[in-house]
Amino acid sequence: MLNLALLGTGGGMPMPDRFLSSVILNYQGRKILIDCGEGTQVSMRILKWGFKSIDIICITHIHGDHIFGLPGLLSTIGNSGRVEPITIIGPKGISDTIKGILALIGYLPYNLYIIENPKLPINFSISSKGSKIENSNGNISISTLELEHSTPCIGYSFYIPRKPKFLIEKAKSNKVPKEIWHRLQNGENVNYKRKTYTPDMVLGEKRKGIKLSFTTDTRPIDTIADFINKSALFICEGTYGDNEDLEKAIKNKHMTFSEAASLAKSGDVDRLLLTHFSPAMDNPEIYIKNATNIFPNTIIGYDGFIDELSF
Ligand SMILES: [Zn+2]
Ligand SMILES: [Zn+2]
């Protein structure tokens, strides 16, 4: 099960009733934060999910509305007594940006691991005790995709694999000793009493996991459909609701609601959640038809929106 909340749904600048676009994921009590604009700390206080358990911060791009909250947030986490490292993933240029931010902060009681524009999925094992990067396996995998914005920008997809079922009858008919059932169930190959046992001797068919994808601040480029394919939830920017703003969207490298909806449709996702609304758009709800005409399962995001994705 994966819980998520929209901490803010605005683009450009924080408004009195709309914080900047940011998402927090909660898995096994540990947190992954996506983007951190000015004021993200305040919306995190309102949500009350805590600061200390943020293990991974994913930054889409280095525009103020997505990163200006980082110095404050990293300091607050330091003040909360955290000593375990935090991993920051970001686009090309993130290492230099973080260096600058650290010069501003001065001292942090924990280390930062920076991963700049990763080309391969990163596997994390996350438990209630914390998270660490694994070479393979792990229980959450983070992939990125280069997007098309006015500065290097990446999208994220999060995948939680689902373990196959343990089949007692299969284990018995393959004469697998009970003592090693647990290890095989965890995916290990086991040598026991001069015999090798493999997980497939006790496990059933592969099962579909949970996929969540997130793209903001981009034109709707072709590669997105594949990247978000079959997501349970696709969170996407909808900077402009009105179709008449298409020219602005093209010029500023953003999207309209209908462009986001077309992506959701071609990516065959279950649901589309729109966010990153232009400060000029007071009530995004009035444009919902521009999205639902193309992709009916569209939700207009709002600050404090909470959702749960399960197997
Ligand atoms: Zn933005
Ligand atoms: Zn931007």
Image (cartoon, rainbow, N blue to C red):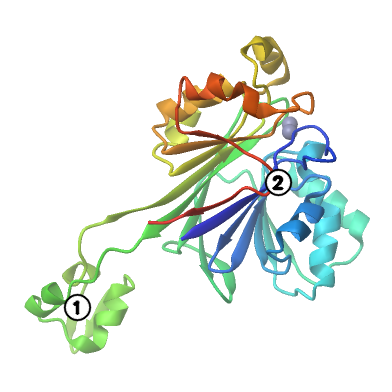
The residue closer to the viewer here, 44 or 122, is 44
- Which residue corresponds to mark 2? 35
- Which residue corresponds to mark 1? 196
Secondary structure category for the residue under label 1: strand
The residue closer to the viewer here, 47 or 62, is 47
Decide if residue 40 is in sight here.
yes
Q: CA distance from mark 2 to mark 1?
A: 46 Å
Tell me where residue 9 sits by quadrant: top right
The residue closer to the viewer here, 120 or 276, is 276
Tell me where residue 285 sits by quadrant: top right
Secondary structure category for the residue under label 2: loop
- Position of 218 relative to 41 (above/below): above
Q: How many residues crowd mark 1 within 10 Å: few (<14), some (14–19), many (20+)?
A: few
Q: Label 2 amino acid?
A: Asp
In the visual, does 156 lie left or right of 170?
right
Q: Is mark 2 within 8 Å of ligand 1?
A: no
- Position of 2 relative to 213 (above/below): below
